[in-house]
Image: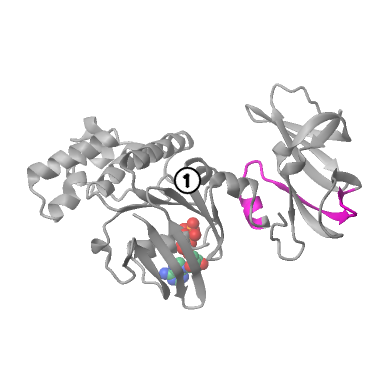
Amino acid sequence: MNVYLQQLTKKFANVTAVNKLTLHLEDKKLIGLLGPSGCGKSTTLFMLAGLLEPTEGKILFDEKDVTKVETEKRGIGLVFQNYALYPHMTVMENITFPLINLKVKKEEAKKRAMEMAELVQIGDLLKRRPKELSGGQQQRVAIARALVKQPGLLLLDEPLSNLDARLRIETREEIRRIQKEVGITTVFVTHDQEEALSISDKIAVLDKGVLLQYDTPQEVYKNPANEFVAKFLGTPAIVMTEGIVTEGRLVCQGVTLRENIGMENKRVRIGIRPEAFYRKDTGFEVPVQSVEMTGKDLSVYFHLGQERMRAIFFSDERITQGENLKLGIKTDQILLFDMDSGSSLG
Ligand code: ATP
């Protein structure tokens, strides 16, 4: 199912939680709604679910305007961070519950629940109650329950927040697999950029209720629309600094970072991702301030003029504090932003 949000707006008293949001959620795609706390992710999801009425704008499911259709009649599956399973029911009863509610015959409901349980790989846990399951298993049950009615749209609100780091990664891969297997249009709300990058087909980045960028994870990471998106995505974070474009050269702290820039002379904001630096014998020389080992990576800190920078290398590189490092920068990875608006200068 294709879903269209058109100029969708939600105001609460004096807060505009979602501001003229226009988005096309493509059929069978997993769309990550990403942004910091309070950016309007949950409000958007609740409007898609019919749990909140928009102040303005429309929601279309394919050609059908569902803006005023109640939740039960939208044909959606919902999963929240706190599983919300019925504690007194078994796994089987939890999954069949939506069907029994719809007056589907018991045998048929059981058959469909079994299929769902197999899909999310909890077929051997059907007799247990929620408190006898791990967090990850509970979330699988919640997903099976959301899918059992064969909805056209699956809405996931921070579904991994209550899981520990390892289980989060496992479960997000599972969600991806299930989503592709079922082929269901899915919206995944998260404030975790790594999570969004790793499982989404497309990411919508929101800030203060406004859509900043909507594109594939690769594009949002490599070509952020503005400084906010550049800073919000990527660990370790991008380093931001300032420089000038003068006669076709980009100069930062006395070092020429790039030549042949087709841009008028002006001051610019510069973004450099830590992986853009590489060792180069003929490059600029900097003393290494400190080195941090994080498993497969080495984070190396140094100053470029006044500006503290971080470069990232594989941890088998030999780099020590105090040594002089000669570095180059992959010029296609230097991002430029407008001084005033923060918009990408391409
Ligand atoms: P989080 O990640 O913290 O859940 P979010 O991105 O999901 O944040 P929303 O919950 O959608 O953000 O909130 C967006 C804005 O709307 C916030 O400023 C919030 O305080 C405000 N807001 C949300 N719900 C209400 C409400 N019922 N009444 C008043 N203001 C609200």
Q: Nearer the viewer, residue 73 or 180?
A: 180
- The residue type indicated by label 1 comes to Asp
Tell me the residue at 72%/43% (across/down): 333
Identify residue for label 1. 201
Q: In the rendering, at what x and y percent does residue 310 appear?
A: 75, 40
201 displayed left or right of 107: right
Q: Is residue 136 above or below residue 49?
A: above
Tell me the residue at 31%/42% (across/down): 182
Q: Secondary structure at mark 1?
A: loop
Q: In the rendering, at what x and y percent does residue 6 appear?
A: 44, 68
Is residue 82 visible in the rendered image? The answer is: no
Q: Residue furthest bottom?
A: 13
Task: Report whether the residue tagged 1 is closer than 8 Å to ligand 1.
Answer: no
Is 246 covered by the magenta stretch? yes
Q: In the rendering, at what x and y percent does residue 315 appear?
A: 69, 25
Assess disc 1: are there few (<14), some (14-19) or many (≥20) residues with their C-alpha within 10 Å of its C-alpha.
some
Q: In the rendering, at what x and y percent does residue 46 appear?
A: 38, 62
Is residue 15 visible in the rendered image? The answer is: yes
- Which color mode does the image show? one colour
Q: Nearer the viewer, residue 288 or 45?
A: 45
Tell me the residue at 10%/54% (across/down): 103
Q: Nearer the viewer, residue 190 or 215?
A: 215
Quadrant of the drawing holding the C terminus: bottom right
Q: Which residues are magenta?
A: 228-253
